[in-house]
Amino acid sequence: MFTKSILLVEDNPDDEALALRAFGSSNFPHPLRVVHDGKEAIDYLLCTGGFSNRNPNEMPALIMLDLKLPKVAGLKVLQVVRTHERTKMVPVVILTSSKEEKDVLNAYSLGANSYIRKPIRFEDFVDTIKEIGKYWLRFNELPQNLG
Amino acid sequence: MFDQLKILLVEDSPGDARLIEEMLKESNLAQFVIQKARLKKEAFELIKNNSFDAILLDLNLPDSYGIETCMSFVKEFPQIPIVVLTGNESEQIGEEALIYGAQDYLIKGQVDNRPLSRALRFSIERFKIQKKLKESETRFRTIIEKNDDGIIIIDKQNIIKFVNPAAEKLFNKSQEKLINETFIYPIIEEKPYEIEITRNHHDTRYAEISIVIIDWENTPMYLLTLHDITERKNAENLLRESEERFRLISENSLDFISMISENGSFVYASPSFEILLGYPIRELYKKSLFELINEEDYKKISNWKNKVQEKYRIIDSKGNWHWMEGSSYTILWKHQTFIISVSRDITERISAENEIKKLNSELEERVIQRTAELEAANKELESFSFSVSHDLRAPLRSIDGFSKILMEDYKEKLDATGQDYLNRVRQATLRMSDLIDDFLKLSRITRAELVRTKVNLSEIAREYLNELKNSHPERKVTFKIEPNLYVNADNQLMKIMMENLLGNSWKFTRNHSEAVIEIGSYENKEGKIFFVKDDGAGFNMAYASKLFTPFERLHPAVEYEGTGIGLATVHRIVTRHGGKIWAEGEVEKGATISFILP
């Protein structure tokens, strides 16, 4: 089942801090889980490695995925997510600095649900984070079962 | 048996006539048959109707007198011998008659039977001999005069004694001029020889002379027969000259000219072969061309019977191969088949061609290598762009984010100046973010693949300007757009280019209450030139060269915002299409950007 939580995959501590502040300042009511590289993200989702004790039946309602990640790149994480039966339906929003056409294309062709470029201006950044959270956790409907 | 001789006796005196008749009848030398005439007229009639062996003529007739009588008979009847009868006192007339053609004369009264008949008889015989002689002479004269060969008789002192008309013609001089002149040409008795007769500067005749020694008027003389061989000689000369000409051409030709028999043996080889092959020509004549030709090539050209143009290799005395190119064809000469071949040494050309081929393949390799290098460079640039867009932006976000957080969380601790400083930090951050974005745009244009289609610049301009107008309805800007400005270019890049150009015009006319933006074209010798013209802020032509440099700006940021990448982008788009772009302007009068797209 999907839980009303978000998995943020972000290696940059500044961005992590800014994102947390953005969620905090908008009084975001849902839990936010942060992992710091691609491998950790996969382990978390597939309940492997350091996350083998996690309940595999609980899936975040949204993955916010950076592309440039240590160990396993963001697009690779996306590919793995879309390949596995349990994770294939989890909404993935790419949240990155790049707006390279190539990256956008690759992300969508691998099954990203959205592609957002992190704004530089902090006010914009906060707005963006809020909107994403609101849209995917409040408005968006997900199936009951993981499939 | 006596000969019967018919005599006409012309005598007006019946007594004399009878006497003479009696005398002749008694003759035992011949049997004389006599007819008589008293008058010349009568005699003429008789002669015309009868044939006589002789005429016995009294000169004094009633209708003719004296020597005149003799002359008229000789003239009228030259074929009949005449014996004249004269009076006693007229021996002188008799002598005169002999001069005029009478055979003999007899003096009346002194004649007797025997002398009369003997005189007649001898006259007849002599006349016959004379006639034969005359005929013979005429015959020989004709032979000599009508002879095509010149006949000259000279004495042992080389003085010309006789020439025939052919000789006159040959020397182009009359016999009067030639006779008694010295024959100036050599005299060789043993065998025929040729002489050259120069008649004048441009007229030379050739004659072949044969000489015999003859007896001429009891003196040994040379009889020269001159056969005109000018025509033959000229023909020979022409032939020789022509042959010489061909020989010169062939012998001096750098090409290799040969005539070979069907089995390949040389009948002729031009001297150029000697240099090429290193054999003396005489050695070459012992060889067959076919044994000198590369076996493989020989197969190609073995059907030399047809006219062919071929390349083949030929080996020289040192064993080096020479590339030859030539044509050959078969001829029939003296009932045998020969091959004529004209070739040239193309060894150098072939090696040059090979060199070019080698260079080409090297060039190809180099192009492949360069392309690979370029591709690598492009990849590098791409990853660089990725890195720039990602890595440079992230810190900016931190700077801006934490500045903002600082301003919020430490509001009380920061005075107005502190707040202002942080605002400046944030402004600079955003500006840097814009710069990075524009920089990436520019690099994308450089890397983007060109897809040329027919693009209507007028349409792009109209759409974009309308967009601008809608977002700024307060501005009074007139658009002049020449319709159907077609170019063969990348649609996406054309859009970016036009938006940059028109965006500039829109921006720099902002401070004018009314403005005109014009898009048009004209032709000149370089081709079709497009332009975007405005009457806005313009620029100082002294800085025109800076316009197209990335991040160069001619206006202060406070007056006109921008990163200075717009015209650099346009410039790159135009040059990527192989075109040319330039700008003209004047401060506060406007700017015109012109470009050509091939």
Image (spheres, coloured by chain):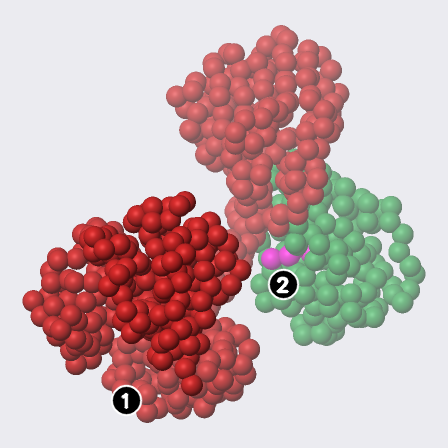
> Which structural element holds mark 2?
loop
Residue B134 locus on image (x, y percent): 33, 67
Q: Residue B76: in sight, yes or no?
A: no
Q: Is residue A126 left or right of residue B404?
A: right
For the point 60% across and 15% down, the residue is B510
> Which structural element holds mark 1?
helix
Residue A83 locus on image (x, y percent): 78, 69
Identify by letter the chain in green. A
Circles 1 and 2, Cβ within 8 Å, touching? The answer is no
Q: Residue A133: in sight, yes or no?
A: yes
**Residue located beneath label 2 in the image:** A73
**Residue located beneath label 1 in the image:** B283
Tell me which corner region of the image, top left, top right, bottom left or bottom right, holds residue B207.
bottom left
Amino acid of disc 1: Glu
Q: Is residue B224 left or right of residue A20?
A: left
Tell me which corner region of the image, top left, top right, bottom left or bottom right, holds residue A3.
bottom right
Q: Quadrant of the C terminus of chain B?
A: top right
